[in-house]
Image (spheres, rainbow, N blue to C red):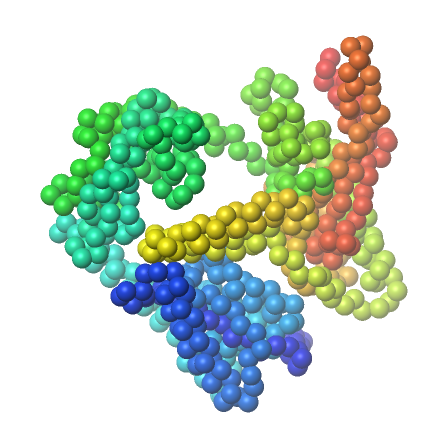
Amino acid sequence: MAKKKPLPNLNGLIAGYLRISDVKFPDGCVSVPDKEAFLDKLRQIRMSELMQDAERDGCTIDIWYDDIGISGRGEYLAKRIAYQEMLRDAKAKKLRAVYARDLSRLGRDLIEQENFFLQLEAQAVDVRVADLPTSGDEAARTLVRQQLGSLNQYMATKNGQVIKQTNLERVRTGQWVGRTRDQLGLRYNKATKFFDYDPETADLACLVYETFIACHGFARATALTLNQMLRDGKARAAIGPRGGMWSGSTVLRIIKGPIYRRKIQYEDLLIDSEDKIPAVVPQDLVDEVDRLLLVRAPLNEVGAAKRKAGRLEHTFGGMLFCIHCGRRMIALRNPGSRAGRGPVLWLSWICCQGGDGERGLCDCKFSIQQFRLDALVSEGLRQAFEIYEREHFKSGKTPKPKPVKPLSTFSEMMAKLDQRRDRLLDLLESCEPEAVGTINERLKAIANERIKLKEQPEVTAELAADTTIETLSRRQLTSLSKKLETVWETPDDMLSHAKHDLLKTLQVRVMINILPRAAKKRKDGNTRRYPGLLSAQLHVGILGMAGEHSLEITETQDAYNAYIQWKCCRRW
């Protein structure tokens, strides 16, 4: 039986998508107002083109999605914030049609392109592009679209290879290829297309090398020392290259930079260019730093291997959040037993801002064991299936999709702020001196917005998965219920991939709340709080139980008594 095609939303909006991946500013356009004026003019030109296309079809564009100046494909597709927002609005049945100038503006990857068209066709959203046919057989239009998408992908790959080969030839001839921003001790000269010596910042580059040597090759200790010198008001101290505090990554980028060794690097190619790159750091400091890096290299490899081995895969990874602060909960293996060494016997979870140390910013100071979570979540999922079946199938009515209020997740909102910050930093590198104060004020405002955003529990929980919840049939619900019973019948396994995959399919998010018991007074007069029953808000996105529709579940007294007995046995 043929599947019914979805009906278009006649009251939906008509959208226009603007995108230019690489904006070429004309000569002389260096200040912030000039660049903003150029972008506005370019934006108006692109908008007028799409408005003319819409007028030919007898309609007008109601909403715009702007990704001008943003390049992203593959794993970097999330950088295109407006593109992702357009997809969410299409899934929420808010759009009727989307206009784009040409197919390459939507993307130059064939798989991503076809995925985009399939998602919009599933929501009955018409995509109108100037270089695609609008009439004829549907199969023929699809064939033309795929052929054009393959051509765009081939041209993008070919251009990338040509650019790479050109850069390699330029590096071999001693030309500079890379960032043209000013560096410590070096100022980029647009006339010669190379760097000139900058005496104003050269001393700071030498200070970084000297401090790195004094700290015996530890980048983090170097950053802390430079920050402390800045707080103490030392004469040679200065802020970091990007206008903020020093960090270990910034120190390593300067220490390992080939330009301070008077060399040009492009991928694996390293060319000596002592005749063109001026000496900023004395050679004896560079040699000593190279020696320390060589000595520290084996130790860094061992430390990286230990950190990689310490990253556990666990059943509830990325699904648990603290109900008090909204931050993620982290896993601890064998807490209180040989500092977590040895085989993994049990896992405990604690808020990433909890505990009694310097990070103890959250009110929740208790940890929760993996087996308690396992029992609570399994019981909550069974209740969720029963509620869904009772509401949708017992009454004999056909279930309808439940719209959920679209929320911007924490990562998406942070990505928007990062995008604004990166644009301002790029403008800061080539702006006029009188515009520096304005840009710094905007950067401070963005930093304050990031702080306020992190303080919002409802945002940091990242509970919004999709804007529309698909309705499950009776057969699908029965299949998921049987799978739940089968998976949870297996012995308790804290690293269960089957349970983790099932929870991801159900779009599970759990807000943890550990209720404290009555305070117990010690002999010394101090009052200590002990963890009590476990309570949680269970969000099951595939069942529409998210946000306000989440399920409240609480641990039974028998389960809590079993935990107390386990704890007493472990002590003995």
Question: Hey, which residue is sitting farthest top in the picture?
Answer: 523
Percent across and percent down for residue 437 are 42, 51
In-image side of 224 versus 469 (left or right): left
Whether residue 418 is visible to the viewer of this picture, yes or no, is no
- Who's the residue at 48% across and 53% down the image? 442
Q: Does residue 36 lie above or below 435 as drawn?
A: below
Q: Is residue 172 above or below residue 374?
A: below
User: Which quarter of the figure has residue 542?
Assistant: bottom right
At 24% from the left and 47% from the top, the residue drawn is: 187
| Horizontal side, residue 367 vs residue 413: left or right | right
Residue at the image point whose x is 17% and y is 37% from the top: 279
Residue 383, given in percent of the width and then of the height, sits at: 81, 48
Q: Which quadrant of the rendered structure holds the C terminus?
A: top right
Looking at this view, is 426 or 386 the one in front?
A: 426
Q: Quadrant of the N terminus?
A: bottom right
Q: Is residue 170 left or right of residue 369?
A: left
